Image: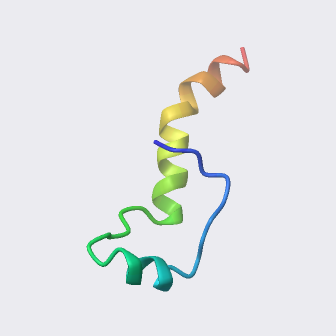
Amino acid sequence: MGDHRWWISDLREFERDFPDWRLEYDVGDMLLEIYEENSERWSAGRR
């Protein structure tokens, strides 16, 4: 899991330079992964 501080919405130039690269995550997938990785820690902080 990486750091999701910025988002590039137009990938055409990148895809042109790296034709074998494929997008694996969309915004929903990223948010779900962030939640799943942190939910226990966040809940523990509320006690």
Spot the residue most to the top.
47
Question: What x and y, as percent, mark residue 8?
Answer: 60, 71
Question: What x and y, as percent, mark residue 25?
Answer: 42, 62
Residue drawn at point x = 47 percent, y = 46 percent = 33
Relative to the observer, which residue lies in front, 40 or 27? Answer: 27
Residue 32, compared with residue 24, is above or below; it is: above
Question: What x and y, as percent, mark residue 21?
Answer: 32, 69
Residue drawn at point x = 67 percent, y = 52 percent = 5
Spot the residue most to the front.
17
Residue drawn at point x = 72 percent, y = 14 percent = 47
Using residue 46 as the reference point, say whether residue 19 is left or right of it: left
- Where residue 9 sits, quadrant-wise, is bottom right
Question: What x and y, as percent, mark residue 42?
Answer: 65, 27
Residue 2, compared with residue 26, is above or below; it is: above
Residue 37, compared with residue 10, is above or below; it is: above
Spot the residue most to the right.
46
- Where residue 22 sits, quadrant-wise, is bottom left
Relative to the observer, which residue lies in front, 13 or 10? Answer: 13
State the count of labels. Answer: 0
The figure's colour scheme reads rainbow
Residue drawn at point x = 47 percent, y = 66 percent = 26
Relative to the observer, which residue lies in front, 12 or 31? Answer: 12
